[in-house]
Image: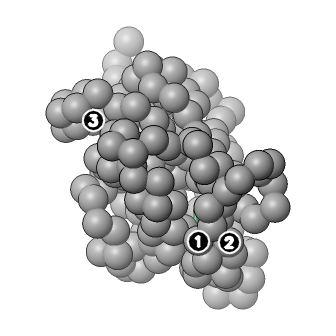
Amino acid sequence: MAKITLDEIRQLLRVVPDFPTKGIQFCDIFPLFQRPDVIEAIIDRLVDHVRTQVKTPVDVVVGLDARGFLFGPMLAIRLGAAFAPVRKQGKLPGQTTQARYSKEYGEDVFEMQSDAVQPGQCVVIIDDLIATGGSAKAAEDLVKQQGGIVATYLFLIELPELGGSKVLNSPVFSLLEF
Ligand SMILES: O=P(O)(O)OC[C@H]1O[C@H](OP(=O)(O)OP(=O)(O)O)[C@H](O)[C@@H]1O
Ligand SMILES: Nc1ncnc2[nH]cnc12
Ligand SMILES: [Mg+2]
């Protein structure tokens, strides 16, 4: 069967004006999930990228609450890695570390369980989309607080006008620019 192209993936995305606040052009990824073949193609491409570009075995895939959870565990299974969630404040039990951040349309606090990443572990951070990079940078701060090493960031979509990848301190791979 022919490989699903990036243009086919892009055409399935839905732009919703003025959501969640006026002036934001919201990129809705959920139409992709009506197509299991497309989701499989996305995961295949992300796995290929990690296998070819990350030279050490990945210990932990860190996914960002909530849309990063849609891709993180699937990627972790394929890489034979653990999955660890970064969650919005107040959702994780036990001891956690915190990082406050701003994103394209608001502010929030992220938390990670203190034993989720061990010192020296190789970590891949994944989310659906990077806009300003505020969310991803906060996740990086949490991984580093625990002594983890961020090998790469993975995003399905990058909004390049917002310059998010420039605030991050490890290589960024985005499947699509939008
Ligand atoms: O690069 P930034 O400006 O930080 O924005 C990107 C983040 O914003 C969205 O999450 P959001 O917290 O809005 O919602 P979610 O819980 O649906 O993932 C998106 O899923 C990214 O996580
Ligand atoms: N424009 C946008 N569309 C979807 N998710 C986002 N997260 C931050 N900015 C976004
Ligand atoms: Mg999110």
Q: Which label sits on residue 37?
A: none
Left or right placement of residue 146 versus residue 99 in this view: left
Q: Amino acid at mark 2?
A: Val
Q: Earlier in the sequence, mark 2 or mark 3?
A: 3
Per the image, label 2 sits on a secondary structure element best described as: strand
Q: Which label sits on residue 99?
A: 1
Q: Pick the residue in front: 30 or 134.
A: 134
Question: Which residue is rendered at x = 41% and y = 79% of the image?
Answer: 162
Per the image, label 1 sits on a secondary structure element best described as: strand
Q: Pick the residue in front: 71 or 102.
A: 102
Question: Which residue in the protein does label 3 denote?
Answer: 49
Left or right placement of residue 28 versus residue 139 in this view: right
Q: Earlier in the sequence, mark 1 or mark 2?
A: 1
Number of numbered labels in the structure image: 3
Question: Which residue is rendered at x = 34% and y = 19% of the image?
Answer: 2
Callout 3 crowding tier (Cα within 10 Å): few <14, some 14–19, many ≥20: some
Question: Where residue 78 sits in the image (x, y, percent)?
Answer: 45, 20
Question: Which residue in the protein does label 2 denote?
Answer: 109
Q: Nearer the viewer, mark 3 or mark 1?
A: 1
Callout 1 crowding tier (Cα within 10 Å): few <14, some 14–19, many ≥20: some
Question: Where residue 32 sits in the image (x, y, percent)?
Answer: 60, 40
Q: For residue 16, what is the image quadrant?
A: bottom right
